[in-house]
Image: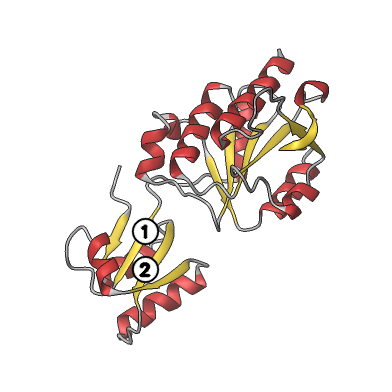
Amino acid sequence: MESNIVEGRNAVIEALRAGRPVEKLYVLDGSKDGAVMTIKREARKAGIDIEYVDKIRLDRMSETGHHQGVIAKTAAYHYAEMDDLFDKAKSRQEDPFFIILDNIEDPHNLGAILRTANVCGAHGLIIPKDRAAGLTAVVAKASAGAINYTPVVKVTNLTAAMEELKKKGLWIVGADMDGEPMTSLNLKGPIAVVIGAEGSGIGRLVRQNCDMIASIPVRGEIDSLNASVAAGVLCYEIVRQRG
């Protein structure tokens, strides 16, 4: 696995023009350098987030000490296409079973969910471009190797992706403590499960685009689970119903 930090003007320009998946671009605040301006223009064309930071922040991020005012954070692993998830389900002769993540920014949670997805037989994950952890080295480590087997798709618009899945015959079930008990719902057939961040849960528009909302029964004094644990519980209810 290669480093997920690319630094220096020429190296960053080459990474952008080669189509290497860039998560975020960090640029020295106030820089007017011509090469940096070119990098910013290329990043905007590719829809890449740009964060303006001071030299101290860049120095801390740098692995070489020669960042030249610009650092790109790239994906440690390549992202899949939506068709790859369907192809995986087809190759196993199974109904599609996907996990959609909304606002999961903790890389450890993403890695743990990847691990759960692989063990329970999900065909892949779908994550949004913004406000989400990407496929970094931390995620790879937390996934315990699952990142090598379970494809991850990154989409620009989560609700639009959900609509496309519905058109292809999938039911979308969101996880929320205000929903129907998961054991009372029919979770068989082609399905995608939406997991939101601990505390904030799934977003309003994402929730509105779900076909049903499932809750996990709780018996204790607190009423929420860590996102990766909630994903595991709900996914295994799907596994149970599928037999």
Q: Tell me residue 18's x, y (percent).
A: 38, 62
66 versus 159 height, above or below = below
Please state, as top left, top right, bottom left or bottom right, where the C terminus lies in the image. Answer: top right
What kind of residue is marked 2? Answer: Tyr
* Badge 2 vs badge 1, beta-carbon distance below 8 Å: yes
* Count of all numbered marks drawn on residues in the image: 2
Tell me the tag on residue 26: 2
Residue drawn at point x = 40 percent, y = 57 percent: 20
Q: Percent position (x, y) of residue 209?
A: 79, 48
Q: In the displayed structure, does residue 39 sit left or right of residue 205?
A: left
Q: In this rendering, is residue 216 above or below 43?
A: above
Compute the Cα span from label 2 to label 1: 8 Å
Q: Tell me which residue sits at (48%, 29%) in the image.
A: 115
Amino acid type of the residue that numbered disc 1 sits on in the rendered structure: Lys
What's the image's color scheme?
secondary structure
Q: Is residue 174 visible?
A: no
Q: Earlier in the sequence, mark 2 or mark 1?
A: 2
In this rendering, would 42 be left or right of 116? left
The label shown at residue 73 is: 1
Secondary structure under the numbered disc 1 in the rendered image = strand
Residue closest to the eye, 204 or 123:
204
Where residue 215 sits: x, y (%)? 74, 31
Q: Note whether residue 47 is visible.
A: yes
Q: Nearer the viewer, residue 207 or 73?
A: 207
Label 1 Cα crowd, 10 Å radius (few <14 / some 14-19 / many 20+)? many
| Residue at horizontal 55 percent and vertical 46 percent from the top | 104
Viewport quadrant of the N terminus: top left
